[in-house]
């Protein structure tokens, strides 16, 4: 199976009081295409930062990230925008839906930018919503939905783009266990149906139990021999 | 583009209370602009009407190189063949009526009082039809060749009223003393103290007789309208190159043009202040609104939304705010005008003017366009800074700040 991501000595630090504070201290990882991977570890250990670097929404201080075989460590913002649009989907703990748009409109938000036209947009969006059990809520606004339903809309928005990878930062943190399970099943179904890769940062042991690969982080590093 | 417009429009209703606050700010600014501009335009139009129908007409025709030059013997330059020149002027397209005039200095004697005055010879039966801003406070206009009408201040200084007789004493153009006893037909005021204190009018025929000349100094003109002046001036200069047509704005530069320029400058300044207030008023609301959407913007950007597209959406959103606010402002201004200001705004006398007057708001189509476009542009400009600031932030920063 070919590689989705490969990181070499990935480092990240930020300035605080004129001092460099290291967050990631040399991460070497590989993610295969179609993976269902969790990054786990205590708070403040750098999981979100790693996800941000993999999702090209931040740049590493040192080291290299390869995405589908290409070095993407220091691309310009325009190229990153195109890659994020076409190849990546992001899901966050706090949904971040557009409250003034319907579920269907939120789901189809990026489709015109990807070349979808006319009825094709609605058709494709409805397929995704059906897959996530939201077809009946297509005309509703996000505020009319439960937390779990909103998270599924956020997933639908990310998935509708047919990305190579979905990066999800604590996607089940705000959800009850029943809803979280539904969402995890939805992820698994998408992995199966579309061969979409999933990389999660999470504390949720339930989600972790579904992962095919688990990377444990501690103090900005991947614990050696801890991948399971 | 449809998606952007739809999204921008819907976002207006995201936080109705905040949108309402912004709309009120923009609408008040727009209404303020329209009302103030209508007020200014009303004043300017009243000044213009007073100037045109009070004394100058739409313009005057002088012998070439005569106007504005001080001469020892001005009558030597006056128009020698008035009847023929009058026909030439009337032949110019756009001219509707001509009013021949001569001006002269004379002493006016009543009892033991002798005052100097600025006299003018006119053809009353023609002038009455056009010059309607002469307000008679006693008696009426000139009816016969032996009638005289006096400015209010002059009449008061002489202690005369309508029906009295005064004596004019002056020099003919040949330097001989001449005079006539004239019947005071009326006492007027034109609203300008400088005129009312020194000015009097007699029949042109009487003035010519007293000055011993058949010439006229100038012709005032009634044209089809202000906008016809260029056409009229060209026609007259073509018909007789020895004539110089001068428009009323130039003739009454001190009162009319300076007042108009003053009001225009004042309006420009007030307009800037109004727009700054609008900009500051909505700047804060826009900034707070954008701050609340940091996470949403961050999530969209993380998923590949272009900054340029977000910029468009947010700018169009604020443009819609400016547009709707501008429309509401126009409606508000029209209601205020129709309901509260329909009877005019009482004004105190202006500089050099002696009477109170009423101003009616006059709103021209260009004012409506301005009241719509300026708040729209202001809303867009006021939003540029907070939007740019928001979009310059990194995605992790946007996601963290919610």
Image (cartoon, helix red, strand yellow):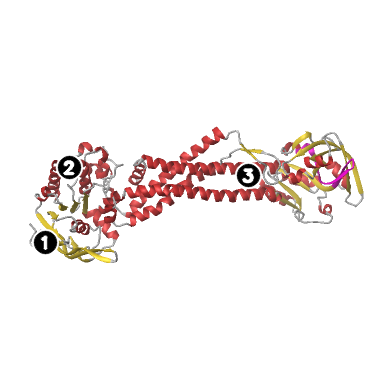
Residue range (magenta): B106-127
Badge 2 sits on which subunit?
Answer: A
Relative to B280, B224 lies left or right: right
Q: Position of residue B24 (x, y in %)?
A: 44, 41
Tell me if residue B114 is in the magenta stretch.
yes
User: Alpha-carbon neighbours of circle 1 within 10 Å: few (<14), some, or many (≥20)?
Assistant: some
Q: Position of residue B163 (x, y in %)?
A: 85, 33
Q: Nearer the viewer, residue B23 or A203?
A: A203
Q: If the image is split into quadrants, where does the N terminus of chain A sit?
A: bottom left
Q: Could one spot residue B150 in this view of the protein? A: yes
Q: Position of residue B103 (x, y in %)?
A: 81, 47
Q: Position of residue A123 (x, y in %)?
A: 22, 42
Checking the image for residue A223, the label placed there is 1
Labels 2 and 1 in the same subunit: yes
Relative to B269, A108 lies left or right: left
Question: Mark 2 falls on what kind of element?
Answer: loop
Checking the image for residue A132, the label placed there is 2
Question: Mark 3 falls on what kind of element?
Answer: helix
Q: Nearer the viewer, residue B306 or B217?
A: B306
Residue carrying label 3: B44
Checking the image for residue B62, the label placed there is none
């Amino acid at each position: 199976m070919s590689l989705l991501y490969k990181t070499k000595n990935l480092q990240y630090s930020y300035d605080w009081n004129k001092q460099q504070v290291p967050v990631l201290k040399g991460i070497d990882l590989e993610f295969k295409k179609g993976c269902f991977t969790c990054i786990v570890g205590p708070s403040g250990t750098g999981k979100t930062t790693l996800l941000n670097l993999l999702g090209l929404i931040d740049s590493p201080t040192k080291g290299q990230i390869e995405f589908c075989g290409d070095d993407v460590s220091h691309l310009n913002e325009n190229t990153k925008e195109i890659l994020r649009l076409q190849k990546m989907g992001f899901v966050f703990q706090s949904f971040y839906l557009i409250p003034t748009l319907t579920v269907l409109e939120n789901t189809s938000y990026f489709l015109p930018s990807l070349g979808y036209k006319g009825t094709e947009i609605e058709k494709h969006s409805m397929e995704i919503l059906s897959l996530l059990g939201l077809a009946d809520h297509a005309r509703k606004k996000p505020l009319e939905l439960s937390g779990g339903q909103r998270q599924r809309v956020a997933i639908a928005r990310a998935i509708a783009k047919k990305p190579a990878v979905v990066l999800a930062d604590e996607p089940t943190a705000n959800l009850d266990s029943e809803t979280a399970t539904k969402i995890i099943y939805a992820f698994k179904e998408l992995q199966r149906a579309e061969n979409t890769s999933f990389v999660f940062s999470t504390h949720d042991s339930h989600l972790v139990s579904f992962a095919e690969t688990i990377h444990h982080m501690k103090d900005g590093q991947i614990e050696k021999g801890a991948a399971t | 583009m449809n998606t952007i417009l739809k999204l921008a429009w819907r976002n207006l209703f995201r936080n109705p209370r905040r949108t309402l606050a912004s709309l009120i700010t923009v609408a008040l600014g727009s209404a303020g602009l329209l009302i103030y501009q209508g007020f200014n335009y009303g004043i300017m139009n009243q000044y213009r009407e007073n100037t045109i129908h009070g004394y100058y007409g739409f313009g005057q025709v002088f012998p070439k190189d005569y106007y504005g030059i001080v001469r020892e013997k001005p009558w030597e330059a006056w128009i020698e063949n008035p009847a023929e020149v009058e026909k030439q002027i009337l032949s110019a397209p756009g001219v509707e009526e001509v009013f021949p005039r001569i001006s002269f200095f004379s002493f006016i004697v009543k009892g033991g009082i002798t005052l100097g005055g600025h006299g003018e010879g006119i053809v009353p039966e023609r002038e009455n039809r056009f010059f309607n801003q002469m307000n008679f406070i006693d008696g009426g206009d000139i009816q016969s060749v032996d009638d005289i009408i006096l400015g209010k201040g002059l009449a008061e200084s002489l202690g005369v009223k309508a029906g009295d007789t005064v004596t004019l004493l002056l020099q003919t153009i040949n330097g001989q003393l001449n005079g006539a006893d004239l019947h005071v037909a009326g006492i007027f005021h034109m609203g300008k103290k400088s005129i009312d204190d020194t000015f009097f009018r007699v029949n042109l025929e009487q003035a010519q007789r007293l000055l011993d000349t058949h010439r006229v100094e100038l012709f005032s003109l009634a044209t089809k309208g202000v906008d016809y002046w260029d056409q009229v001036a060209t026609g007259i200069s073509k018909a007789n190159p020895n004539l110089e047509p001068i428009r009323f704005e130039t003739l009454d530069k001190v009162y009319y043009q300076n007042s108009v320029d003053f009001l225009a400058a004042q309006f420009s300044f007030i307009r800037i202040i109004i727009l700054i207030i609008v900009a500051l008023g909505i700047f804060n609301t826009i900034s707070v609104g954008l701050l609340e959407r940091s996470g949403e913007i961050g999530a969209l950007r993380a998923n590949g939304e272009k900054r340029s597209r977000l910029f468009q959406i947010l700018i169009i959103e604020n443009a819609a705010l400016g547009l709707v606010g501008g429309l509401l402002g126009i409606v508000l201004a029209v209601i205020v005008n129709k309901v509260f200001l329909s009877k005019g705004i009482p004004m105190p006398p202006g500089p050099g003017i002696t009477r109170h007057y009423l101003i009616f708001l006059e709103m021209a189509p260009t004012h409506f366009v301005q009241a719509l476009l300026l708040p729209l542009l202001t809303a867009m400009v006021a939003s540029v800074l907070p939007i740019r600031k928001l979009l310059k932030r990194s995605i992790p920063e946007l996601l963290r700040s919610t």
